[in-house]
Image: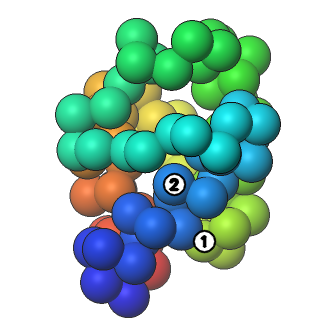
Amino acid sequence: MTRKEVFEKLNNVFCDVFDDDSIVLTEETNSNDIEDWDSLEQINLIVAIEKEFNIKFEISEVNKMKNVGEMVDTIMTRI
């Protein structure tokens, strides 16, 4: 799977989790950029990403992900 394909799938996950089809992710997108992205939604988001990509994040990986680009990097190492 290419980085672009991961981004596309990830964008769909974000749209579903936040119930907002207008979301367009960039490498720098972070929790400050999406209004409803709080600690509870972070958990929902991680679970949805794990399900979509059939992976399981380590807690240390989740803590290191500061933006979508880092999230994609982590996903790319797992798939």
Circles 1 and 2 in contact, beta carbons < 8 Å: no
**What x and y, as percent, mark residue 8?**
46, 67
Query: Residue at image x 23%, y 44%?
Result: 27
Query: Residue at image x 68%, y 36%?
Result: 20
The residue to which callout 1 is attached is: 53
| Farthest residue, direction bottom | 1
In which quadrant is the C terminus drawn?
bottom left
What colour-coding does the image apply? rainbow
Query: Residue at image x 51%, y 58%?
Result: 10
- Sort mark 1 into few (<14), some (14-19) or many (20+) by Cα contacts within 10 Å: some
The span from disc 1 to disc 2 (Cα, nearest Å) is 13 Å
- Sort mark 2 into few (<14), some (14-19) or many (20+) by Cα contacts within 10 Å: some
The residue to which callout 2 is attached is: 11
Q: Decide which of 41, 19 is in the foreground and name it.
A: 19
Q: Decide which of 35, 61 is in the foreground and name it.
A: 35
**What x and y, as percent, mark residue 26?**
28, 44
